[in-house]
């Protein structure tokens, strides 16, 4: 392949780097990268790779752009709210660099399609926000011998590495053999994230991808980078391949993709979502609030700072962070409906109170977010 005069001008700051040069830029231009997720991490990754001239960028994302994404997902703009993320990302990428071939995979990555999608690319970059997809991405990359450029973010902290057993390093399972119990690790939607954090971690991932394409520098294979934005500190851990790893170890037991929802303990959605024995709907919560004769008390179990953002009138705060110390203030024979932001912390709180002998505790499905969507849109969503 030959670079056109326009391309020579576009990539001139690369071309004059001896470590890149014409040969290196041609390697970048003929490389292909699959980006799993066009969210917080995917945004800077895809934008910088596009600017650098990566020849083909695949985007796997089935989600649509939401207002709450814009604080960090800089590949999307306000006018993109409601559009498929993959389409919005493609438009931004091609606005940056029309030479990039963007392939949209407007679908969820599954055990059925992962191998067929991933095999079309040189490198995979993990910008996902959930454990089933993270393990699926890992296993598919190990099976196909593709480098998996890993990043994850939460609140003010991030991690990055390159998983590539075929290059001598470990895989994600060597580091985290078992997923955390469902609900134990809050998502960014529940726990929050500093908007610029995915920018930092994503740029580290993009750097590793360019180094892999160039074959230059010391890659992060076998190293885990830990970043704390509040302290502005980077730390590094050495990682070794686990000989007992079920997928990249000496005697692998996983030879094909498995059911990752099941592996991560996520039950398939019930046919009738209202049928969950521990849940009530926001409509039932409204009935309880409107009719005190029912004798049901509704408690908001979010934290004080969330209560200040949005609350439902007449629902007192009883923060989850204090529940272990303060549950004795509650009456174990009283009926309670517990409401959180989206309905997952309240399910855990129901479990906890059950164990303490509470008989009539229910979780409000969808939490205050569902309340805002279905009952009172004046309550802000965050
Ligand atoms: Zn492994």
Image (cartoon, grey):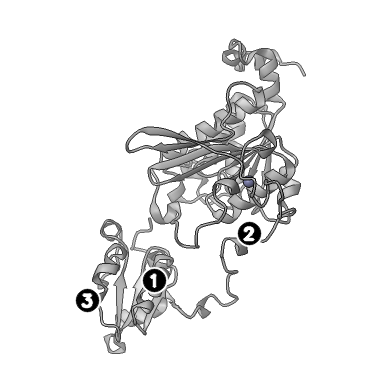
Residue bearing mark 3: 329
Q: Residue furthest bottom?
A: 293
Picture quarter with the C terminus: bottom left
* On screen, residue 251 above or below 359: above
Q: Which mark is residue 260?
A: 2
Q: Which numbered disc, 3 or 1, marks the residue that appears first in the sequence?
A: 3
Which label lies toward us, 3 or 1? Answer: 3
Q: Position of residue 76 (x, y in %)?
A: 51, 41
- For label 2, the SS is helix
- For label 3, the SS is helix
Q: Position of residue 324 (x, y in %)?
A: 29, 68
* On screen, residue 297 above or below 119: below
Q: Which mark is residue 375?
A: 1
Q: Residue at x 55, y 52 (%)?
A: 64
Camera-side residue of 244 and 157: 244
**Residue 356, can we see it?**
yes
187 left or right of 259 in image:
left
């Amino acid at each position: 392949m030959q670079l056109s005069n326009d391309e020579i001008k576009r990539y001139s700051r690369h071309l004059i780097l001896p470590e890149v040069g014409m040969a290196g830029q041609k390697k970048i231009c003929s490389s292909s990268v699959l980006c799993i997720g066009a969210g917080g991490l995917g945004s800077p990754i895809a934008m910088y790779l596009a600017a650098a001239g990566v020849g083909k960028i695949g985007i796997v994302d089935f989600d649509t752009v939401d207002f709450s994404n814009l604080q960090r997902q800089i590949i999307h703009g306000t006018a993109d709210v409601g559009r498929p993320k993959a389409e919005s990302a493609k438009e931004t990428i091609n606005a940056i660099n029309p030479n990039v071939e963007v392939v949209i995979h407007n679908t969820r990555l599954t055990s059925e399609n992962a191998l067929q999608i991933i095999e079309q690319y040189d490198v995979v970059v993990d910008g996902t926000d959930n454990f089933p997809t993270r393990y699926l991405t890992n296993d598919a990359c190990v099976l196909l011998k593709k480098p998996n450029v890993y990043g994850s973010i939460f609140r003010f902290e991030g991690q990055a590495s390159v998983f590539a057993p075929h290059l001598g390093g470990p895989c994600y399972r060597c580091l985290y053999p078992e997923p955390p119990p469902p609900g134990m690790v809050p998502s960014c939607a529940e726990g929050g994230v500093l908007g610029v954090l995915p920018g930092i971690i994503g740029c580290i991932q993009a750097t590793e991808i360019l180094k892999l394409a160039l074959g230059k520098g010391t890659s992060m294979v076998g190293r885990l980078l830990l970043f704390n934005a509040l302290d502005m500190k980077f730390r590094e851990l050495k990682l070794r391949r686990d000989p007992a790893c079920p997928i990249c170890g000496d005697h692998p037991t996983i030879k094909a993709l498995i059911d990752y929802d099941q592996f991560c303990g996520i039950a398939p959605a019930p046919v009738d979502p209202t049928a969950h024995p521990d849940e009530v709907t926001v409509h039932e919560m409204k009935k309880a609030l409107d009719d005190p004769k029912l004798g049901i008390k509704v408690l908001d179990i979010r934290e004080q700072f969330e209560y200040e953002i949005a609350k439902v009138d007449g629902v007192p705060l009883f923060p989850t962070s204090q529940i272990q110390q303060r549950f004795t203030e509650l009456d174990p024979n009283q009926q309670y409906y517990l409401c959180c932001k989206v309905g997952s912390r309240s399910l855990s709180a129901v479990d906890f109170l059950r164990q303490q002998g509470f008989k009539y505790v229910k979780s409000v499905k969808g939490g205050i977010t569902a309340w805002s969507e279905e009952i009172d849109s004046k309550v802000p969503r965050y």
